[in-house]
Image (spheres, rainbow, N blue to C red):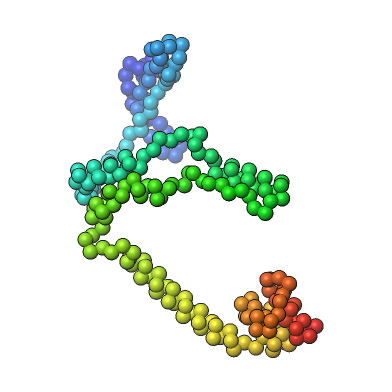
Amino acid sequence: MYRKEMEQNDFHLTNNNRSIVFHIFNGVAEEINKKDPNERLASNGFHVYYLPYADDIRTLPKNDTARLTDDKVDLFKNIIRNLKFKYRPEKFENPALQTLWRNIEATALNKNKPEEFIDLTIPNIENQNKKIVEYIDEIKQTIFPPDYVMGITKRSATKRKAETAATSTSSKKTKADDNIDVEAAARNNLLTKLTIPILKNYCKEQNLKASGTKKQDLIDIILQHLAIN
């Protein structure tokens, strides 16, 4: 079959009980390295080309996307060229492994914290900016409209609205929290229903120091203060 396919490309029909597939077998000859006859670069075999149905053939929409002018393309080529550097594997340590080794060392030697690791795989933004500083103004003119002001975007406005809403909600909660009688809640065994911030505020007002920061620690010190068993 291989010899036959090498002589001519045959058309085949395959039925795999699910769908019928049309394809062409293209025989590929063995490839030997000319410099070293004992080295085989590729074995003989087949290339299989699947053929489409009539339904698969359609006219793709024309892409009218605007393209940059040649001078703008050259601008970004220069930027990429300036940001390139020669990669040397021996200059970069694996951040994950180095962090692991330092954590193991700190644990084994009872250190308070592992030694600091400088991750050289993180791009040096300051150094990159220095390399392309001469192109910054031209980049801005290319990407942004003339009246664009850096930092003023729709996202910033949305963020401000969200912050305003959050502040308003927070102030409402604070006013509501001020009206809660913690001592009455303690006498009625309802301290577990109160939030941690409310319990902390009460402890702060009464100069109470809990043994921990968990909710139960705060409840225990309040009950002890009020002499409630």
Asked if residue 132 can be seen in this view, the reply is yes
Instruction: Report which quarter residue 59 is drawn in.
Output: top left
- Which quadrant is home to the C terminus? bottom right
Does 1 sit above or below residue 216? above
The image shows residue 16 at horizontal and vertical percentages of: 45, 35
Q: Examine the rendered structure and indicate whether residue 119 appears above or below residue 37.
A: below
Q: Residue at x 39, y 47 (%)?
A: 127
Quarter of the figure with the N terminus:
top left
Q: Is residue 152 left or right of residue 185?
A: left
Q: Quadrant of residue 101?
A: top right
Q: Vertical placement of 137 versus 100: above or below?
A: below
Seen from the viewer's position, the closer of residues 28 and 211 is: 211
Residue at the image point whose x is 28% and y is 52% from the top: 136
Residue at position x 36%, y 33% in the image: 50
Q: Give the residue furthest to the top.
A: 37
Residue 188 percent location from the top left of the image: 72, 87
Left or right of 211 in this view: 51: left
Is residue 194 something one can see in this rendering?
A: no
Q: Nearer the viewer, residue 80 or 50?
A: 80
Front position in the image: 223 or 124: 124
Residue 99 in percent (x, y) is at 59, 46
